[in-house]
Amino acid sequence: MAPPNHFCLFSAIFLFLFLLSFPPTSAILPKVNIHLPNAKNPLPVTPSKLVKRVCKGDSIDRNFCLQVLTTPEAVAVKDSTQLGTLIMKLGAANGKATLDAYNEMIKKPGPPQTLKALNSCVEAYKYAIQSFKIVSTELVDDPMTANYDVSILAPEITNCDKALTDAKVEAPRLYDGNRFIKYYIAMGSQITSFLEDQKCVWR
């Protein structure tokens, strides 16, 4: 087994490479019905210091992050583990709503390449939803694995985006859903990175 410092170094390198994969995002959120915050509404409560720290991440859409993490439920969390659990819960719920949208789209008549693209996205979302749930169980004992498991979801959604584009699928709601789940993935990567850093300090 590698020394603890090697785990910390690996985690830091992995997070750096992961952050580079996210382009800058707009703070303006489109109006779609998939568990999305309203960017024009004021924050319902004052965000906690931990939430502010998470939302400052380079790969994070700050407006989105603050909107979804300034609910009474989010402010009530006591530590990074509880916040991580909440982020995974929100990510899974958002993923389920988008998955339902894909399943609705599949029922409509369309060319074979469209059906193939939609089905590939359905599989990506099933995997993402299950992974969010699994990561919630890894936060305390194995945050490094949790960070890896949530971070590798981003390429799955990127592949889904590409499949939709290549098949010329015109469905803004699906593209928006993909964008928002990437935000949750970035937030999950950020909070699991915090937990891994804390564990490195404790060793």
Image (cartoon, rainbow, N blue to C red):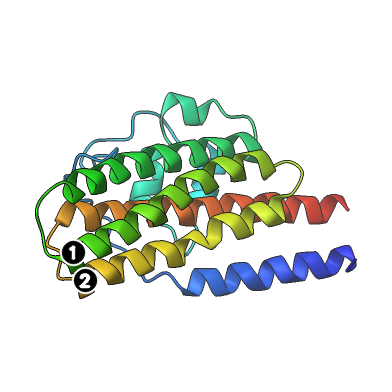
Q: Residues within 10 Å of mark 1 (few under 14, many from 20)?
A: many
**In the image: residue 137, left or right of residue 165:** right
Residue under the point 33% across and 64% down: 160
Dot 1 amino acid type: Thr
Q: Position of residue 176 (x, y in %)?
A: 24, 54
Give the image location of residue 108, x and y in percent.
11, 49
Residue at 70% x, 50% y: name it.
Answer: 143
Residue 33 higher or lower than 14, as above or below: above
Point out the frontmost of discs 2 and 1.
1
Name the element at disc 1: helix
Q: Secondary structure at mark 2?
A: helix
Image quarter (top left, top right, bottom left or bottom right) of the N terminus: bottom right
Give the residue at mark 1.
114
Pick the front one: 157 or 18: 157
Left or right of residue 79, residue 101 in this image? left
Numbered label attached to residue 165:
2
Q: Nearer the viewer, residue 77 or 92?
A: 92
